[in-house]
Amino acid sequence: MKSAGGFTVIELMVTMAILAIMMGLGIPSFRAFISSQKVKTGSYELMTSLVIARSEAVKRNTTVTLTPTSTSKWNQGWSVTGSGATLHTQSEIQGLTVTTYTNSTCTAAGTVANIAFSNSGRTSASSCYKFTADSTSNTRCVKVDLTGIPSSGSC
């Protein structure tokens, strides 16, 4: 008599148990990865908007402003405007908190209402923004100095 090919119930149960253990170990680290990528994405989006605003101010020889969509709440998105036209918009990135802070290079305390670049590409005040993923310790900071050149990195 020939034996039938296939899996036994025991083999299937052992495979499922091993898969469940591997998933249990992998999912928490995957969540941390997603959180850190969300923080990086948010900070890079602000960096992109700052570079666009600065270059458009120099190119158009006028003041270009980066303004949050909702009264000083940067985590709900922002827009770049100049000469009465909207040049770039960024929608809200879910799960991020954006706060301003003060240190030796960033003198603007509290919530910064907007960032204005003059026709020389400079700003009137330096400002710093900290991106944090909700309920994690992942952070990334974006700074704009008086020359108007933005930088991004760890806080």
Image (cartoon, rainbow, N blue to C red):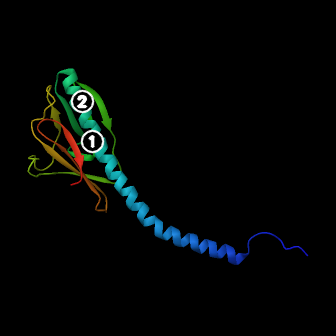
- The amino acid type of the residue labelled 1 equals Leu
**41 relative to 111 in the view: left or right:** right
111, 131: nearer the viewer: 131
Q: Nearer the viewer, residue 97 or 149?
A: 149
Quarter assignment of residue 8: bottom right
In the rendered image, the vertical position of residue 48 relative to residue 32, given as above or below:
above
- In the picture as drawn, the residue positioned furthest to the front comes out as 2
Is 30 left, or right, of 77 in this rendering? right
The x, y position of residue 87, in whole percent, is 29, 28
Q: Which residue is mark 2?
A: 81
Where is mark 1, residue-wise?
A: 46
- Residue found at x 26% / y 40%: 47
Quadrant in which residue 135 is drawn: bottom left
Instruction: Indicate which disc residue 6 carries.
Output: none
Three-letter code for the amino acid on which mark 2 is drawn = Thr
Quick one: label 2 or label 1, which is nearer the N terminus?
1
Number of marks in the rendered image = 2
Q: x%, y% of residue 149? A: 18, 37
Q: Secondary structure at mark 1?
A: helix
Q: Position of residue 18 (x, y in %)?
A: 57, 73
Q: Of all residues shown, which one is farthest toward the top? A: 60
Question: Residue 35, relative to residue 10: is it above or below?
Answer: above
- The reply, left or right, for residue 36 in relation to residue 53 is right
Work out how far the residue at label 2 is from the one at label 1, CA to CA, in angstroms.
14 Å
Residue for point 23% across, 26% down: 56
